[in-house]
Amino acid sequence: MSENPKTVIHFPSFEGHDTFGHPAPHGWHNSFLEADRPFELVASGAVGDGLRVEYFAGTRKLKVLKGTDYRVMLEGLEPGLHAVYAVTTLGGTTEISRPVTVLFQARP
Amino acid sequence: MLLPHKVWVGLKVMGGGDGKTPVSVTFDRVALTIEAAGPGGETAKAFREYHPPVETHRLYLAKAEAAGRKGDDRFFSPFLLLPKGMKPAAIRAILYTAGSKEITVEGKLFPWDKGTGGLRKPTAMADWEGALDVDGLDPSTQILVHYGVVRVGGYFAPEQYAEAVRQLARVSGIAHLPDVPFLVTGASFAGGYSARAAQLYPEKTIAAAPVIIGAAGADTADAEVLAVPHLHVIGSRDGVHLAQVEKALPALREKHALWGAAPMWRVYHRQHKSNALIFPFFLEAMRLRLPAGADPTNGPVTLTALKEQDGWLGLADTWETNAPRAVPAREYRGESKNVAWLPSETVARVW
């Protein structure tokens, strides 16, 4: 088990109810972005020399960061549902964040 | 940056101690600053959550009759929900939410009246059959809209599904509805319904995702059912369900089932965030199993059969770590049969 802080991608995402069968709370918005428009992602996790942070959408690698900065601007994705997640590697230990599924919608 | 409404901040101390004996640490001078002005300038210009209102949908309700039953409890009411302006020929698949009538409007459950047996009708409807417009559906409905998926549900057992879509075809005027293949999911007892639906209609089931109901259906020996992609999602703290799945995985591999599973860690009997995996799983199943140019208006769609070797295997022996692993099935040389079959690399990554 890694001793690094857990890799987490920060993005609005409903964490689920503590009761069974309830709907999403009023005013809650799932993860939606406009398609084909730059957007920002931030994750958190391991910190240290040699840190490598990779952002993915499904099997597609969106960006690789080397250093300690987790913040990144990404090109817009095409319309559709994309599972976005971060992978961090430090000192030979790799961790994967939970994915967030984001629907990218085209503006009419 | 845009953050969830609730944020956890982790603090970690590096060094100190002998690595064995617990060390007491106190954080006594920690200050966090919230930018009152909100997101920074760069973000404000570039990052906008975008969720236009869901277009008006049309809900069709049919009064159907269960075969072989007598008395008032033989009736049930399936519903069909689709965008009002959707052309019937554009329907690619049905999302069959077995045993469920939940629809969320403006963040609240859509109100239904209960009748005898399986009869349910929207409170706003006067009759037990008909149609009405629905506005204010949950934004996640846009996922279905985008991929040409319409929803069929209602309080009825999967044995009645064929009759349900026949009656919905009559009420909606969408004659080819019974020939549209379906994705099926449900939670708890409705999860069992979704596994049962795949058993009853394997030729129509694109994929099944039974939620919080162990390895429902895993005792089948029917090769046609085992070839329908399944994904069981369970809560790790939900009684026996995870143990049932762990027991079933090796047996499913022995049967070459195209079935997989995924736990939601530290989750009890809740759906929690199961859709975060189920939807990518369903969409990949549609991509792989719906033939190019499939057109149910010309008759039943013949689903493409998937090959075990073309899928991926999620290594359940790693799924409790922070870096679960999955490998292409054709490259797997491990001896452990604690593996979950997944239809594609995309699903494997999300898994």
Image (cartoon, coloured by chain):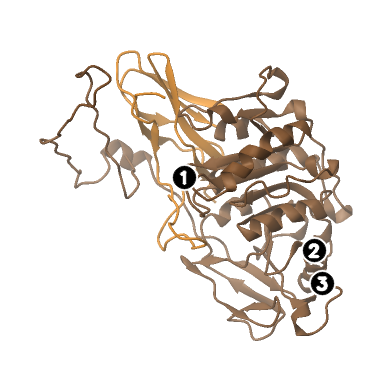
Tell me the tag on residue A33.
1
Amino acid at dot 1: Leu
Q: Position of residue A12 (x, y in %)?
A: 40, 46
Tell me the tag on residue B159.
2
Q: In terms of image quadrants, where is residue B336?
A: top right
- Please rate how many residues cluster around mark 1, counting C-alpha atoms within 10 Å: few if below 14, some from 14 to 19, many from 20: many
Amino acid at dot 3: Arg
Do the residues bearing badges 1 and 2 touch, measured as CB atoms within 8 Å? no
- Please rate how many residues cluster around mark 3, counting C-alpha atoms within 10 Å: few if below 14, some from 14 to 19, many from 20: some
Q: Chain of mark 1?
A: A
Q: Position of residue B305 (x, y in %)?
A: 82, 37
**Residue located 19% across and 47% down the image:** B36
Amino acid at dot 2: Glu
- Please rate how many residues cluster around mark 2, counting C-alpha atoms within 10 Å: few if below 14, some from 14 to 19, many from 20: some
Q: Which residue is mark 3?
A: B170
Q: Taking A74 as reference, is A70 left or right?
A: left
- Disc 2 versus disc 3: nearer the observer: 2
- For the N terminus of chain B, the image quarter is top left
Marks 1 and 2 share the same chain: no
Helix, strand or loop at label 1? It is strand
Between the residue at mark 2 and the residue at mark 3, the CA separation in whole angstroms equals 19 Å
Asked whether residue B322 is in view, the answer is yes
Q: In terms of image quadrants, where is residue B156?
A: bottom right
- Disc 1 versus disc 3: nearer the observer: 3
Chain appearing in orange on the rendered image: A
- For this rendering, which residue is in front, B349 or B283? B349
Q: Position of residue B132 (x, y in %)?
A: 64, 76
Marks 2 and 3 share the same chain: yes
**Residue located 43% across and 35% down the image:** A38
- For the C terminus of chain B, the image quarter is top right
